[in-house]
Image: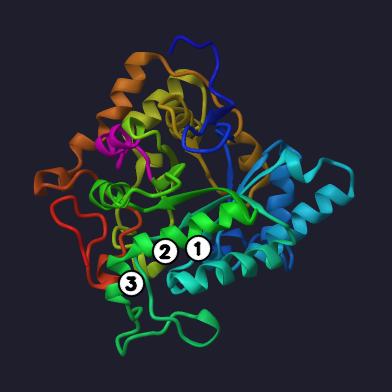
């Protein structure tokens, strides 16, 4: 790195005026993971407020997380107490799979805005390229085996969903739009449809066990910024946690060795690597100490960046032809592999 410090923010090329996204965000996924003795009845509000107090200005949430009301309460309290202004924050939300029909896209973001207590979000992502058949009040309609009922035609026509999302920029519901969990193949197809507004971001699972070097290179070549979800290796909900029984990068011997070298925590090594390679990150935590620690990042020597970049090559999955170990794998849950680079599914 030529810089003496890590980037505080990244320019988004595919946005009017090149908006900047803070490099370190606070993730609010899965409220059950926030339960702790200090969080009382509203753990996400407490954790989000703690993050704001610690200096986070990038808050990442989604309709499907079930936490937007608590996130909104934290933001409202923080502003009401004179700690900052709405324009000081970058708030990301995501379109859930049951809102993929073009006529439902605006409904999806308006529900999120109401729950958040905001007039707009800074970034709105298509959470997955997969469309679900909506049930009552846009809940997921389930198959007999408990998995989601997938709208196959809608999943293949995410371009129509994208065009409806473009309208949200025009109406001021969001400043920028992007995608999430999109493979190279799916991103190529979206770009080939000649969108009026290009995706600003692709939020994807990124950590040393799944560095996705090829995908990041493709996104960079097309002016699309990468944000890392699960930057510490991930703790997804059980339905998509197919590798939950396996160890993650936080306990990897190489990461532990590098952490000892710098007298830092393994989490700080993983997050510093993420920002240093040019991605923004959205780690989550319910611990006041860890929320603050996750912002105290540092520059890794280039030799250590190389070591971390190559950790995935030693995983047994690589021998099976895979590009690393995913924490979040919905293939059994949905019945197909949305991440395949061999062929598009469904």
Residue 280 location, x and y as percent? 49, 36
Among the two numbered marks 1 and 3 on one chain, the one whose residue lies closer to the N terminus: 1
Q: Alpha-carbon distance for marks 1 and 3?
A: 14 Å
Q: Is residue 338 visible?
A: yes
Camera-side residue of 213 and 222: 222
The C terminus appears in which quarter of the rendering? bottom left
Q: Furthest-bottom residue in view?
A: 144
**Mark drawn on residue 95:** 1
Neighbor class of circle 1 (other Cα within 10 Å; few <14, some 14-19, many 20+) is: many
Q: Alpha-carbon distance for marks 1 and 2?
A: 10 Å
Q: Identify the element where label 3 is drawn.
A: helix
Q: Taking 335 as reference, is 166 left or right?
A: right
- Residue at image coords 42%, 44%: 198
Residue 305 location, x and y as percent? 35, 22
Is residue 261 positioned above or below 146 on the image? above
Among the two numbered marks 1 and 2 on one chain, the one whose residue lies closer to the N terminus: 1
Camera-near label (1 vs 3) is 3
Q: Is residue 127 visible?
A: no
Camera-side residue of 22 and 210: 22
Q: Which residues are magenta?
A: 205-219
- Snapshot quadrant of residue 145: bottom left
Q: Identify the element where label 1 is drawn.
A: strand
Camera-side residue of 21 and 267: 21
Give the residue at mark 3: 154
Disc 2 and disc 3 in contact, CB within 8 angstroms:
yes
Is residue 294 positioned above or below 316 on the image? above
The N terminus appears in which quarter of the rendering? top left
Residue 37 location, x and y as percent? 70, 60
**Mark drawn on residue 327:** none
């Amino acid at each position: 790195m030529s810089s003496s410090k890590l980037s505080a923010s990244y320019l988004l090329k595919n946005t009017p005026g090149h908006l900047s996204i803070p490099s370190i965000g606070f993730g609010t996924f899965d409220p059950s993971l926030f339960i702790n003795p200090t969080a009382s009845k509203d753990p996400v509000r407490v954790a989000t407020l703690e993050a704001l107090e610690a200096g986070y200005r990038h808050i990442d949430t989604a309709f499907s997380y079930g936490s937007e009301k608590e996130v909104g309460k934290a933001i409202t309290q923080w502003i009401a107490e004179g700690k900052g202004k709405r324009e000081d924050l970058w708030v990301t939300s995501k379109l859930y799979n049951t809102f993929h029909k073009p006529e439902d896209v605006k409904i999806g973001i308006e529900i999120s805005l109401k729950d958040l207590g905001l007039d707009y979000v800074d970034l709105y992502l298509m959470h997955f390229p997969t469309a679900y058949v909506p049930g009552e009040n846009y809940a997921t309609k389930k198959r007999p085996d408990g998995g989601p009922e997938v709208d196959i035609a809608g999943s293949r026509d995410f371009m129509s969903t994208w065009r409806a999302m473009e309208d949200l920029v025009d109406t001021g519901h969001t400043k920028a739009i992007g995608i999430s969990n999109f493979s190279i193949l799916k991103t190529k197809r979206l770009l080939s449809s000649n969108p009026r507004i290009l995706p600003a971001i692709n939020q994807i699972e990124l950590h040393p066990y799944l560095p996705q070097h090829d995908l990041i290179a493709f996104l960079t070549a097309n002016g699309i910024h990468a944000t890392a979800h699960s930057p510490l290796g991930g703790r997804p909900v059980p339905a998509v946690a197919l590798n939950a029984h396996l160890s993650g990068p936080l306990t990897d011997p190489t990461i532990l060795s590098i952490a000892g070298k710098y007298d830092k925590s393994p989490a700080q090594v993983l997050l510093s690597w993420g920002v240093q390679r040019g991605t923004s990150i959205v780690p989550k935590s319910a611990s006041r100490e860890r929320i603050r620690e996750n912002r105290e990042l540092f520059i890794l020597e280039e030799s250590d960046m190389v070591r971390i970049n190559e950790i995935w090559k030693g995983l047994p999955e690589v021998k099976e032809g895979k590009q690393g170990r995913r924490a979040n794998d919905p293939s059994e849950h949905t019945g197909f592999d949305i991440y395949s680079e061999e062929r598009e599914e469904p």
